[in-house]
Structures are given as structure tokens and as C-alpha cells.
Amino acid sequence: MTTIKENLTAIREKIIKTAVSCGRNPDDIQLVGVSKKKPVQQMQQALDAGLHNLGENYIQEAVEKIDHLGRESACWHFIGHLQSNKARFAVRYFDFIHTVDKLKLAREIDKQAKKIQKRQKILLQVNIAGEETKSGATRDRAVALAKEIMGFENLELSGLMCMPPYFDDPEDARIYFKQLVRIRQDVLASGVDDGAMAELSMGMSHDFEVAIQEGATMVRVGTAIFGSRT
């Protein structure tokens, strides 16, 4: 069984190899370790091995872990479905919120960020395959929502996020990554500033190399780092 440190080394090598092969700078790609349902001991091992970004899916679990490890121990990414009544915790604990998909949620995050004089970095989640079981704005709604979010003083729109269907063959996910890139182009064409679309959060343990080839700047990797969740 490989160690977390060995897993991280292997993933970083794949990121570098993939980025270089398609003419990209590996430094432009952030590796976000998805640590949901994993103990703080394993998270600390990842931090000790040089991982700087950790992603959590559940507010209560995340708050306990972050309080234990320290707010400054990592750049924290919230990557799960966020209810408006939990927005205050997400704002207080997370550097990035990847899963903003409704104006109501954006408004509440802005409200909570204003209370603590914070400019909250967010990503707009797109339901790229129109799956009923997943959250996210539709393609048409994403463009309008991005423009609306730009009007909030305490939100910093940083880009887009998607979670395509799972495929045994990672190549089958490529079309969805391409679609997210096209949606970013549509958002920019609508007049939204380039800086608001700098990030593309896409790609997971089984398909992050394909995502990088299509332009991902953040890849969310859990199983390949920490092993399968029980």
C-alpha cells in the first residue's frame, strides 16, 4: 500500500507531464485534495507532504477539522452542496466556495461576507450534463448568473466549476470539459471581466489528466491521494 506522500508525488508528476505535453505551465494548475470523510491525521500527512489546498463537502465535518488543523494550515475549498442557512460557516471557514449555483445563495454569501468585511472568492457551478441528481446552473442561466454576481460588493467571482458524469473511460468526460470552456467564453462575451473567469475547477481522480488537457486550473482529487472512502 502506498503512502499519502507517495500518492501526492505520483499525482504531481502526472500533472506536470500532462501540462507540459499540451503546452501549459504546471504551476497554473492547483491540486485540491478532497478530504471528506477522511481523518485529520491523514489530512495532516498530506499537508506535511506539501499539499496546500484541501477541499471539504460537508460544513459540520469541515468546521471540526479546520478548527483542529488550523485555519491557516491550508487554502480551504468548499466543494459540496451549500444550503443558504449554512453560508455563514462557509464564509468564515473557506477561502473558495466552488458550488454557487443560485442567486439566492450568492446573495446570502455576500450578506455574510459583508458582516465580517470579507471579499469571498466563489466559483459558479454548472450542471454540465443536466443531471437531476446534481446541483448547478444550466448553461443559459450560468451566463446571466455570472453577470448578476458581479454586482455584489463582497463576492469575488473567480471562475466556473463542473462535475461531469462518471465514466470508466476518462476520454468520455472530455466533451463536458470542453463545454465548460465554451460556457466561460460565453460569459466573457457577455461583458464579464476576464479576471472573474480565471479558474476552471474540473477533473477528479479518474479524469484529471483529460481535464488539464482541456484547460482545468483546479483539479479535485480525493481517492488517488487518500484512498477509497469507507
Image: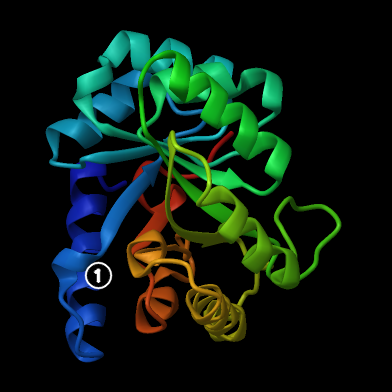
Pick out the residue farthest to the right.
Answer: 132
At x 69%, y 19%, the residue is 85
Q: Quadrant of residue 70?
A: top left
Q: Quadrant of residue 158?
A: bottom left
Q: Quadrant of residue 216?
A: bottom left
Would you name the residue on which mark 1 appears?
15
Q: Position of residue 93 (x, y in %)?
A: 40, 21
Left/right placement of residue 37 relative to residue 221 reads: right
Rate crowding at label 1 as few (under 14), some (14 to 19) or many (20 or more) other CA atoms within 10 Å: many
Q: Position of residue 174 (x, y in %)?
A: 54, 84
Rendered position, 20 above or below 71? below
- Which residue is at the front of the view, 222 or 70? 70
Rendered position, 188 above or below 226? below
- Please indicate, yes or no, whether residue 125 appears anywhere in the rendered image: no
Could you say whether the residue bearing mark 1 is in a helix, strand or loop?
helix
Q: The C terminus is located in which quarter?
A: top right
At x 31%, y 46%, the residue is 1
Left/right placement of residue 136 relative to residue 205 reads: right
Q: Position of residue 26 (x, y in %)?
A: 17, 71
Q: Position of residue 198 (x, y in %)?
A: 34, 65
Inspect the image, locate mark 1, and give the three-letter code of the amino acid beneath it.
Ile
- Which residue is at the front of the view, 161 or 21? 161
- Which residue is at the front of the view, 195 or 66? 195
At x 53%, y 84%, the residue is 178
